[in-house]
Amino acid sequence: MTPRRLPAPLLDAALVAVALLDVGVHFDTEEPLRMACAVAAAFALALRRRLPLLTFLLTLPAVLFSDAILAALAALYTLASLTRRRTLLAVCAAAFTFSSMSSWPSPTFDLSETATLITLGYTAATAVAPVFLGQLVQARRDLSLRLAEISAARDHERLLTDQTVLAKERAQLAREMHDVVSHQVSLIAVRAGALQVGARDAEVKEAAATIRRLSVQTLDELRHMVSVLRASGGRPTELTPQPSLADLQRLVESSGIEAELQTDLPDGLPPTVQRAIYRTVQEGLTNVRKHAPGATATVRICHEGGAVRVTVTNTAPTRPALPLPSAHYGLVGLRQRAALLGGTVTSGPTADGGYELRLELPAGGAVVADGGHQGSLGADGP
């Protein structure tokens, strides 16, 4: 069972109270200036979340003038847990060490003495401890966020793979219905029409007309079923609104990375092509966020010579990524989706250390994929 964390205001108030207790332990009525600095440092901890660096600077006089150093250690820990600037942390730790070693107003100490060196070592270790602890907390927080992103990405990859497999099964079923059932029903309709024309008996003509009418009706219903099977990837996609090119800008803006969208696509692209473009951009931005932390991305979508080209390019990462394995289900799903529409998906690193994902589709790929079979289905009818 995960323990519940205290609310931030309550935790800050408790920390201020502990710092004041530290001031009380070292309280000296004959040194009002030093005590004032220590009390001010304790109350400055209320600003540590919003202004961590300023809070640490406000606590330094207490280290320099008094023995109440708990407030400065807490401020240094907060700064280390919130910043990634290692040089700044080293300077702050050094400032704490020399402030603690100094004896104001006579800040003189002899480094040639063994006792002074030992004291300097202990003081430096005291300053470094909250820095290391703060960095450890920051790394744990980053790891938790990264794991949450990876979990969401895996769920997305799994859903996309399931939808692709279901789409292939439905497409195979549609082909079988078209190639076998529609052919047989068309032959029945043609033979019934010939029987209706050549028969002399009125009852036979009426029966042939009924058979022909039912065959034509069955072909129409079969054509609609094939269209539904080819156009949808599964029941979940039929029950939820599907993304289109109008949703791309919102996708880029909510991606959580610095990304630029450049597009010159015409209106009227088939919905299946629009969905393939959207999913490619979505997968590309997800991979940038997962594998290239700190990188920027550029999404270019253009229409040239009857083909749609989508490129998602990112720069080299500025922070190291977690060395976690990937099943590459996302790219596999994209390639399968593109293949169903007569296109291709390629990917690979760039010369500057980044990565590029490319999609190329025929602008009317979905119409060709679906319409070709539907046209032949209509031709088979009477």
Image (cartoon, rainbow, N blue to C red):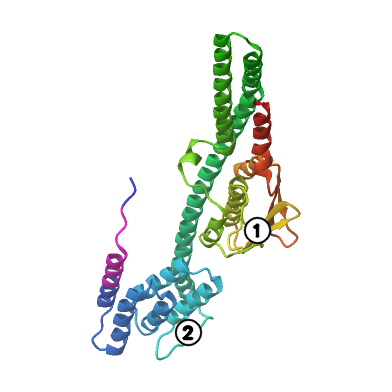
- Depth-wise, is mark 1 or mark 2 nearer the camera? 1
The image shows residue 202, relative to residue 83, as above or below, that is above
Query: Would residue 39 appear left or right of 266 to someone viewing this image?
Result: left
- Residue 346: x percent and y percent? 71, 48
What secondary structure do most residues of the magenta stretch adopt? helix
Q: Residue at x 44, y 88 (%)?
A: 107
In this rendering, does residue 204 appear at all?
yes
Q: Which quarter shows the C terminus? A: top right
Q: Nearer the viewer, residue 233 or 88?
A: 233
Local SS, label 2: loop
Q: Give residue 297's quadrant in the image.
A: bottom right
Q: Residue at x 53, y 59 (%)?
A: 255
Q: Which quarter shows the N terminus? A: top left
Residue stretch in magenta: 4-17
Q: Nearer the viewer, residue 267 or 234?
A: 267
Tell me the residue that label 1 is attached to: 265
Q: Residue at x 50, y 41 (%)?
A: 237
In this rendering, does residue 335 appear at all?
no
Label 1 crowd bin: few (<14), some (14–19), many (20+), radius 10 Å: some
Tell me the residue that label 2 is attached to: 109
Q: Is residue 8 magenta?
A: yes
Query: Would residue 93 appear left or right of 374 to someone viewing this image?
Result: left
The image shows residue 223, relative to residue 26, as above or below, that is above
Query: Would residue 326 appear left or right of 6 to someone viewing this image?
Result: right
Label 2 crowd bin: few (<14), some (14–19), many (20+), radius 10 Å: few
Local SS, label 1: loop
Looking at the rendered structure, the kind of residue marked 2 is: Phe
Query: Would residue 138 appear left or right of 277 to someone viewing this image?
Result: left
Sequence order check, earlier mark of 1 and 2: 2
- Residue 178: x percent and y percent? 64, 26
Looking at the rendered structure, the kind of residue marked 1 is: Leu
